[in-house]
């Protein structure tokens, strides 16, 4: 009977959780969101750089991969695709899409830093 009394008193104990540090949790969430933003900017810049490589390297525009990358790069170039208009087409793509790639890297980096600061991540 003594054993039964001990086990029942153990079962009736209330387990207490440690308090949640919401500031630290918010910092973790902000860090994850900032990392996602940074990766998205990196992927966008990669599409633009790959398009520049395909163009400068005279890749076959009828190829599925080349046309897929070109369609994404055209969308991601925003207003940079016709910013400068040199007579050489390869130089035009190199300069304009290169500037667009740098833009995505800089903007995503700044945005990620702002998200980390606002969210309390270090």
Image: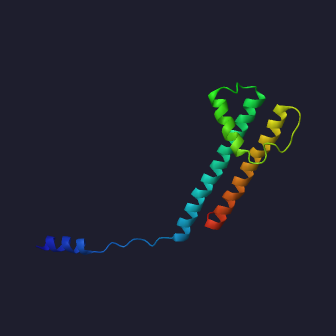
Q: Residue furthest left?
A: 1
Q: How is the image coloured?
A: rainbow
Residue 5 x %, y %: 16, 74
Quadrant where the N terminus lies? bottom left
The residue located at (72%, 49%) in the rendering is 104
Furthest residue toward right: 87
- Looking at the picture, does residue 57 appear above or below residue 83? above
- What residue is shown at x 62% (from left), y 29% (from top)? 64
Q: Position of residue 88 (x, y in %)?
A: 86, 31
Q: Position of residue 41 (x, y in %)?
A: 67, 49
Residue sitting nearer the eye, 46 or 82: 82
Q: Nearer the viewer, residue 107 or 92?
A: 92
Q: Is residue 5 left or right of residue 86?
A: left
| Closer to us: 58 or 13 | 58
Placement of 78 over or under 5, stated as above or below? above
How many numbered dots are placed on residues in this image?
A: 0
Residue at 88% of width from left, 37% of height from top? 86
| Placement of the C terminus among the 4 image quadrants | bottom right
Residue 96 point in image, percent of width and height: 80, 42
Seen at 72% across and 26% down, the residue is: 59
Left or right side of 110 for 22? left
Side of 107 relative to 91 (left or right): left
**Quarter of the rendering containing residue 51:** top right
């Amino acid at each position: 009977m003594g054993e039964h009394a001990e086990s029942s008193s153990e079962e009736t104990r209330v387990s207490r959780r440690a308090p949640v540090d919401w500031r630290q949790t918010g910092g973790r969430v902000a860090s994850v969101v900032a990392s996602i933003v940074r990766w998205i900017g990196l992927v966008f810049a990669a599409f633009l750089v790959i398009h520049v490589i395909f163009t400068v390297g005279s890749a076959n525009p009828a190829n599925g991969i080349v046309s897929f990358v070109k369609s994404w790069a055209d969308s991601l170039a925003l207003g940079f695709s016709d910013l400068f208009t040199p007579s050489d087409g390869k130089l035009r793509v190199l300069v304009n899409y290169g500037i667009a790639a740098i833009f995505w890297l800089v903007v995503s980096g700044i945005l990620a830093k702002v998200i980390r600061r606002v969210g309390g991540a270090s």
